[in-house]
Image (cartoon, grey):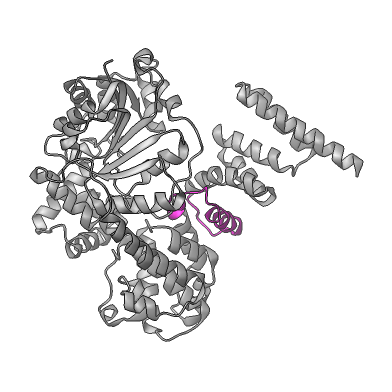
């Protein structure tokens, strides 16, 4: 007994040594301490987790995945919460060619942790489930098996599907359930509820079969919202049905109430484009999400002061008041509020329906530091409050004159404060421009029926067709996402030099340019230690690699003191 205690104490000491080495930047020392600990105690939870996290950060994905998988089995609840996001990130990058029991178990373990963003696992989970199921037989037994499989239920209830192959499979499953209506097995009932949650998350984007029009009661939840009468008539029957009623009936009802109580930061009138954009997001709030973000705690000021071009003296290190201008459904302000509890955040959007979603979730999380307010960026001139940081991601490029919007954002930024923008790339949106041409040719409009018609056209294309690549976009798989992707009422796009002109035109100075890892690597290969804020260099690079910024440009600008 005493020997075991001594061995555990020695292992704990080595883990502590490794963590101190990491904090001091001594990577070799940290690796050596973890390795020494594991050589003495191969199942020490903190050592297994620590080595896995270390290797995940330094490019050893395969070994890291094995260690983090083992750590999830060994760890207590607190350690699992730390390990799960890293394991989920590694699993999300996998492209399985066969079903593996351990992968199935690892995905289930990640879905069980609140620290994991479930949507990040949607693609790999869909691929895993299709490989696991093989051909779908359409029998009651097959449906019962799906409804009794925790991974199927987790995927359908917690993710928006992002796989064309899975969409086709789910269409077949829904048809089989319609044909088997009246089957009362527990698995079948759970599967119907999970498909109802999946349909709600995607806004019932899939084309329903004609017989779905006659469906009533629980089976109808796969194709449309249940009425209040239908929901009330359903007897409480298991956790999946309770989740279906809560998310598709109760929460929207609460959001409708909240919508009417939200204060205004600016007057609600606006130019014709602002009105059209507001109407779009009232009808189709974007983005769709249900699981709240659970970021690692850190100070936002640390990221700001690290910006390469920041005038630190002008900024002053003061970061308390933050405006999220165009917050949509509230994911970004909630993410920031949970990451840095010191922030006082104003989350503003044109759409009250979008705001109500974020306000409800923030209230449920007890986030008193976020206030959700209706407002128009173009009307910020009448606001006297000044903010240390303003963020506006994917917003001003939907204005008639984005430069006017940036001037207004600069006006509510305090002297020395900073603005973070997300804007579309001209080159990376080439595929979207092709979609716009097709939509114009077909005469489609931004109605649910025409969005479904567009999707049906794209889903039917051979893999080699350019527009078939839209099936790789997560936004393709919900009505609001697809509308935002290719049916938006207004869109401007930029090249890197045009970004520099936009920033300078608002009297701001470019101080940071965030690029994805692939883009950063290619920049260093091509230009070495050149200035990362030189937009002409980024323009040369993007000319050769036009899809580098498919997820938008992200840049920081500073206002003069």
Q: Is residue 468 visible?
A: no
> Residue pushed farthest bottom?
182
Q: Find out whether residue 356 is within the magenta segment.
A: no
Q: Find out whether residue 107 is within the magenta segment.
A: yes
> Residue pushed farthest right?
2
Q: Residue 472 placed where, x, y %? A: 33, 51
Residue 310 in the image: above or below residue 62: above
Q: Residue 228 placed where, x, y %? A: 32, 74
Q: Residue 370 placed where, x, y %? A: 37, 42
Nearest the viewer among 114 and 44 is: 114
Residue in the image at 19% along x and 53% along y: 280
The magenta stretch is: 95-123
Q: Is residue 362 visible?
A: yes
Residue in the image at 44% along x and 63% along y: 157
Residue in the image at 22% along x and 52% along y: 281
Residue 248 in the image: above or below residue 119: below
Q: Residue 534 placed where, x, y %? A: 29, 18
Nearest the viewer among 259 and 167 is: 259
The quadrant of the picture occupied by the N terminus is: top right
Residue in the image at 56% along x and 37% along y: 56
The quadrant of the picture occupied by the C terminus is: top left
Nearest the viewer among 100 and 12 is: 12
């Amino acid at each position: 007994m005493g020997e075991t205690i001594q061995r555990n104490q020695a292992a704990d000491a080595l883990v502590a040594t490794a963590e101190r080495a990491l904090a001091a930047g001594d990577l070799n020392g940290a690796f050596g301490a973890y390795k020494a600990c594991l050589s003495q105690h191969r199942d020490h939870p903190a050592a297994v987790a620590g080595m896995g996290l270390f290797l995940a950060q330094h490019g050893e994905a395969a070994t890291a995945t094995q260690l983090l998988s083992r750590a999830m089995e060994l760890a207590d609840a607190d350690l699992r919460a730390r390990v799960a996001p890293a394991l989920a990130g590694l699993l999300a990058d996998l492209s399985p060619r066969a079903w593996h029991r351990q992968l199935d178990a690892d995905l289930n373990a990640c879905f069980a942790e609140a620290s994991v963003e479930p949507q990040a696992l949607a693609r790999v989970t869909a691929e895993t489930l299709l490989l696991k199921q093989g051909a779908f037989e359409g029998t009651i037994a097959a449906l019962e098996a799906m409804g009794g499989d925790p991974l199927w239920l987790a995927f359908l209830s917690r993710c928006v599907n992002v796989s064309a192959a899975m969409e086709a499979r789910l269409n077949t499953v829904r048809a089989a359930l319609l044909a088997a209506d009246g089957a009362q097995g527990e698995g079948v009932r759970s599967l119907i509820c999970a498909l109802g949650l999946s349909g709600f998350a995607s806004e019932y984007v899939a084309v329903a079969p004609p017989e779905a029009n006659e469906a009533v009661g629980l089976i109808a939840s796969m194709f449309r919202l249940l009425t209040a009468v239908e929901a009330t008539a359903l007897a409480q029957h298991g956790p999946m049905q309770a989740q279906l009623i809560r998310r598709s009936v109760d929460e929207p009802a609460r959001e409708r109430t909240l919508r009417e109580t939200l204060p205004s930061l600016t007057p609600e009138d606006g130019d014709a484009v602002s009105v059209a954009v507001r109407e779009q997001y009232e009808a189709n709030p974007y983005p769709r999400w249900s699981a709240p973000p659970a970021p690692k705690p850190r100070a936002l000021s640390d990221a700001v002061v690290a910006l390469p071009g920041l005038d630190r003296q002008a900024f002053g290190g003061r970061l308390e008041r933050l405006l999220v201008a165009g917050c949509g459904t509230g994911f970004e302000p909630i993410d920031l509020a949970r990451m840095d509890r010191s922030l006082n955040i104003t989350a503003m959007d044109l759409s009250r329906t979008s705001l109500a979603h974020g306000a409800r979730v923030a209230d449920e999380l007890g986030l008193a530091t976020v206030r959700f307010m209706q407002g128009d960026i173009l009307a910020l001139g009448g606001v006297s409050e000044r903010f240390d940081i303003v963020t506006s991601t994917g917003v001003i490029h939907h204005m008639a004159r984005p430069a006017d919007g940036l001037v207004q954002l600069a006006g509510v930024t305090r002297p020395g404060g900073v603005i973070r923008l997300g804007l579309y790339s001209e080159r990376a949106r080439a595929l979207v421009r092709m979609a716009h041409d097709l939509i114009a040719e077909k005469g489609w409009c931004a109605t649910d029926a025409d969005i479904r018609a567009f999707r049906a056209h794209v889903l039917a294309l051979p893999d080699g067709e350019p527009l078939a690549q839209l099936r790789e976009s997560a936004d393709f798989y919900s009505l609001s996402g697809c509308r935002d992707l290719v049916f938006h009422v207004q869109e401007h796009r930029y090249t890197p030099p045009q970004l520099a002109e936009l920033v300078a035109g608002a009297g701001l100075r470019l101080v940071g340019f965030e690029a994805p890892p692939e883009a950063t690597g290619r920049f260093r290969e091509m230009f070495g230690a050149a200035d990362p804020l030189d937009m002409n260099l980024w323009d040369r690079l993007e000319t050769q690699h036009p899809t580098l910024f498919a997820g938008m440009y992200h840049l920081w600008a500073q206002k003069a003191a």
